[in-house]
Amino acid sequence: MESAPNTNPVPQMLHVESNGTIPNSNHLFSLRSSLSSVKVPNWNGDLNLRSGKKMGLQSKENPKIVHGEVGYVLEDVPHLTDYVPDLPSYPNPLQDNPAYAVVKQYFVNLDDTVAQKIVVHKTSPRGTHFRRAGPRQRVYFESDEVHACIVTCGGLCPGLNTVIREIVCGLFHMYGVTKILGIEGGYRGFYARNTITMTPKTVNDIHKRGGTILGTSRGGHDTSKIVDSIQDRGINQVYIIGGDGTQKGASVIFEEIQRRGLKVAVAGVPKTIDNDIAVIDKSFGFDTAVEEAERAINAAHVEAESVENGIGLVKLMGRYSGFIAMYATLASRDVDCCLIPESPFYLEGKGGLFEFIEKRLKENGHMVLVVAEGAGQELIAESMRSMDHEDASGNKLLLDVGLWLSQKIKDHFARSKKVAINLKYIDPTYMIRAIPGNASDNVYCTLLAHSVIHGAMAGYTGFTVGPVNGRHAYIPFHRITETRNKVVITDRMWARLLSSTNQPSFLSHKDVEDAKTEGEPVTQLLDGENCKDGHHVVDNGLADNGTR
Ligand SMILES: Nc1ncnc2c1ncn2[C@@H]1O[C@H](COP(=O)(O)OP(=O)(O)OP(=O)(O)O)[C@@H](O)[C@H]1O
Ligand SMILES: O=P(O)(O)OC[C@H]1O[C@](O)(CO)[C@@H](O)[C@@H]1O
Ligand SMILES: [Mg+2]
């Protein structure tokens, strides 16, 4: 354990040449041969990367956007050379690593970018791209200079320990980095807790455990205290694992570090069990959660089919997005009706849930319902005292739809006296996320860890890593925090679910029209492809697996 921060000063002055150039910024301009112009709004006017002019501090309001030919756009991530002067670079030590030296084209070409849209027309513009993740020929840290730290924030997720393990092992084994600290208990751990020294030995078998060995928390993001702690301890690589809230916090930390002119790379690994992080194909732990959710659905099915007029009701996580419920339903095939936050439903009357339950019980003698925790919140609020409560991070605390729905169904059938039902309610809540990652999530977590390390070593900062159409990319923080993925109920994936369960859509013609005018595409193919204004990604995730 290390308790007292050391005071290892790092450069604080932002050096800008008198002619406005940033020395040593060639790195940034590797794309110049193929680019026609660079638009950098608010960066001291309209500047051109070719001229090597200073670009100003980068932020959500001041993104690094590069325009190329035929509508090519690169939404780039910041680099330490953007604001730290005279930064030397070094050959990547992986060149001498026998495991990698034999791999053909192991290093990523500096000009490689990943397209956000892969389904295009003959005449489509090339569209938005992100910088491809992976090791670079040159790095901006010497191995013995690196002092890294890792922090986990927000709710738990299967695979957290695997990401931690692989960051530690990757830094050690690939880059020869030996100084790695674990920050305990989320963001507040930077200033209120001790740190843990991490080595491959101490993390050796943690991927077999659920949770995070570092602990986590909500709330407690005090930017200046956090950056003071980073500076005081001489930390120069900060690995931040967490969801949308965490990545917003990481973005603020990056901006403060940049403002202070510190040579500190801030890199995020997106985490959320709800799979609602924008831009990336899928978040780690999601597959594991769906697999575990299926076990609950299976139990509900066994219970329901074993009694007369049995109803199994399963509540699953999903605060704003119903991906877990949707995919667990699709995977299970035992579910008769899936209710998610994105799709409004109603109970009484023609086309309502009660009518459907009666029909299914008549047909099959039993049925299984799956409800995402964020579903039907307006309905509950109408019939219960509304609670506008928030957690420490400002997330809305939900009313319990599972208990409410169970009671409503029981009341309805008691009142109607048509059928005597036997309802079993299963709420696996934390059981689906407090488990270790499954095999595919563990592999995915390893790739994320490697990608994030390569990015930080190469001097990128202010970025999150994740697969975009199957290729890992570096994505600016603001792109994944400005919106969240939702199930698109006018999309083919939801249509597949409806046809699999054969449940009513509960949508009126007006609802469908409203969904369309809200900017959500009728189909995720071509035109919109989940992009509103070229930015808003409302995708059902899981690209590149033939589901679209
Ligand atoms: N807008 C924000 N600016 C700075 N920090 C934030 C912001 N939103 C959240 N945070 C911080 O990020 C951390 C995690 O946030 P939150 O509890 O919302 O979880 P999350 O990262 O979104 O994960 P989950 O998927 O579990 O919701 C908290 O410590 C919180 O203080
Ligand atoms: O009880 P906690 O830890 O606040 O987490 C619950 C929330 O975290 C999530 O898993 C992720 O945001 C939600 O689905 C859920 O509502
Ligand atoms: Mg969140």
Image (cartoon, rainbow, N blue to C red):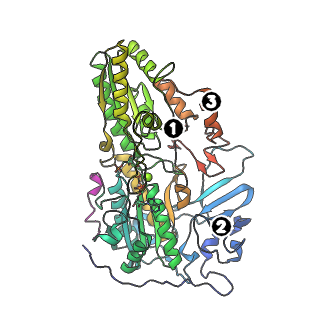
Looking at the rendered structure, the kind of residue marked 3 is Lys
Q: Which residue position is annotated with label 3? A: 510
| Mark 2 → mark 1, Cα distance in angstroms | 40 Å
Q: Distance between the residues labelled 3 and 2?
A: 47 Å
Answer few, some or many: residues within 10 Å of disc 1's Cα (few below 14, many 20 plus, some between 14 and 19).
some
Which residue type does callout 2 highlight?
A: Leu
Identify which residue is drawn at 41% across, 16% down.
358
The local crowd at label 2, few if under 14, some if 14 to 19, many if 20 or more residues have their Cα within 10 Å, is some
Which image quadrant shows ligand 1?
bottom left
Give whichever of 23, 15 is nearer the camera. 15
Residue 520 coordinates in the image, percent (x, y): 61, 40
Position in image of residue 457 (x %, y %)? 47, 71
Q: In this view, does 394 lie above or below 92?
A: above
Q: x%, y% of residue 207?
A: 30, 55
Report the residue at 48% width, 79% height from top.
262
Q: Give the number of the disc on residue 342.
A: 1
Per the image, the residue denoted by label 2 is 31
Q: For numbered disc 2, what is the local secondary structure?
A: helix
The residue range painted magenta reads 195-211
Viewer-side residue, 245 vs 543: 245
Name the outermost residue toward the bottom.
Answer: 18
